[in-house]
Amino acid sequence: MLADALRGVPDRLDEALSLVDGVDDALVHGLARIDEERAAALESLAAAFAGSPLADRVADAIGKILAGTVTDEHLAALAGARAALLGAAHDALVSSLDTALGRSRQASAPAASTTDSGHLLAGGRSWLRELAIAGWRGVDHELAGGAAQAVQSLLATPGARRLAVLLDGFAAELRAAAPVATLPRIPARRWADLWTRALLLAQGGYPVPPATPVDGRLVVLGVDLHEHPTVFRAQAHALLETSGGRVRLVRTSVAAAKVDTISGPSAWRMLGAFPIFRAVLAERRTVEVSGMGLTPGGDLIWDESRAAAGEPADPFAAARVRLGAAAALPVDVLDRHPAVLAEPVLLEGYRPAGEAFDLGGGVTVALDLARLPAAGPLTPALVASSTACLGLLRWDGRWLLQPLAVQAVVKKKPVAVHGGDWALGPADAKAAKAEAAAGTAVDVLRERAGRLLRK
Amino acid sequence: MTTDGADYERRSSAPVIAPAQPRKLAKVPFVELADGRLQGVVSSGSDVERVYVSSITAGDHGLSCNTNNNRPCGGLSGGSHPCNHLRALADAALAQYGRDRVARYLRADLADDAADLWSGLHTTAAPNRAAEVFASFLRHLAYLEVEPATDPLPELQWFPAAAAVR
């Protein structure tokens, strides 16, 4: 029962997270200003790794950092230790969820092939090192803007997009918050997460999972939308049916660069290169895929030339019949973190109770209403009047349900509303009008770009 | 389970940036709070090839306005009294970011009932920053030319799409 996972906390999860807090707090004040309390926290982090393969490197790095030497190598070990703890936290959470849902998951295999953008990564690393030394409280306008050049070169480099997009979103937050010293509250966990991930991605030889071509039918369960000032991404969670009746849970996504003034429903316009992807979402169709690459972690690398829109299919019906028995794929080893946990579930027979669903038996699951995007039709009111919900179970200090689609009763009529319904533009008249007005932003900027960029 | 969520400090998805509000871009295609300035680009009313590059520094509230060809704006002409371009820039910034964020960034002392930004600024003249601001605008426009991506980009799990203002 799902209730078991929602009620219980994995053994020693709190202990692991309190070690993570030690790193996070050190980064708030900066590695150049570690007081006794923060030093003790880092020392207990080093002690926790005793007996692990990282033991020597972590102990050495923390010793050197406490003595005032902060090199790229020390930072990599510190980030590695923090990532390992959160990876373990992720595994414990996923395993409790899999047990509760009766979901089978393949074991993960380390990826072999690697990228190398050598000198480009050095630019990112040196900014991340300055940040770590200064601490978030030491971030002023100049330091916040220090990643600009690295981001520009990474964006222009194939294979470096992942780091570019992360650094760009992270830097935008620091720029908006600078000077951070005057900020009333600091998102310590979040910024340390972004810093850690960026630092690891900026190491040479970061593994890239190989993709294997697959043929089959894709039934979309729902779409999750992601955005920061310069990116918009639609990520579909789907069932992949391949020959022999094998059904796997996969994700497939398309992303476009944008600017901050393009947001809400008009952001879909930036995904013009993916007409099949958008139509499949808006029309709730299946997709026939042939030879599309699938990674061991369950990411299907979308390719319009290898996709054909199929029959209309009701995601709720598909989830009722197939989701229970679908096999889940293991998150890539280096990607593991509670924040990447987004497990598709179908909930029925609950009672909406404020910002939560009451599942009965004294168990409730909180709703992640901050993840109901303006680019889609789902609203808190719809969720509150729903009778069935397809969503993603996430974890951020507690379990949260992010609704991706609901069946509800509106004006005594049953309706089904899906987060991807507006992929080809809003159906709702008011939203369509707003989209048309905001959509001209894209045209205005393109016109300006055409006139000014090539001079 | 029904207890409140984790503290802001301990949440991976803690919100940091309030999403930019949509606004009309024809007159002021670009506004940003960056490098210690509110800066942006204002379209010329008379010439489609020309834009004005305007900025207000945080703290000192130093004003600067020039054309993209680096000619000084006649309306400001090096003074500390804002020209129409700077006024349009300030209005666009308020529309896009909201007054709290703009006032905090510029360290402007803005009364709650202030009609615009100017009552909270003690303006001075500032050196010409047109080249830097214009370069920043071109970088901004260049995002529209970046190729779309189908990579899994797992880190975007930290960046949920902006929720509607309800």
Image (spheres, rainbow, N blue to C red):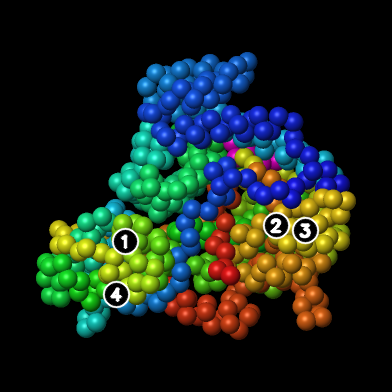
Q: Chain of mark 2?
A: A
Disc 3 marks which amino acid?
Phe
CA gap between label 1 and label 4 equals 20 Å
Ranked by sequence position, the earlier of labels 3 and 2 is: 3
> On the image, numbered disc 3 is attached to which residue?
A357
> On the image, numbered disc 1 is attached to which residue?
B109
Residue B84 occupies quadrant: bottom left
Q: Chain of mark 3?
A: A
Q: Are marks 4 and 3 in contact (CB under 8 Å)?
A: no
Q: Which mark is residue A367?
A: 2
Q: Which mark is residue A211?
A: none
Residue drawn 79% across the image and 53% down it: A364
Tell me where the magenta segment starts and ends, as one range.
A330-336
Same chain for the residues at labels 1 and 3, yes or no? no
Regarding residue B23, the answer to whether it shows in the image is yes
Q: Secondary structure at mark 3?
A: strand
CA gap between label 4 and label 3 equals 47 Å
Q: Which mark is residue B88?
A: 4
Q: As rendered, which of A305 and A336 lies closer to the eye? A: A336
Q: Are marks 4 and 2 in contact (CB under 8 Å)?
A: no
Q: Position of residue A28 (x, y in %)?
A: 45, 37
Tag in front: 1 or 4:
1
**Magenta stretch: residue A332 in it?**
yes
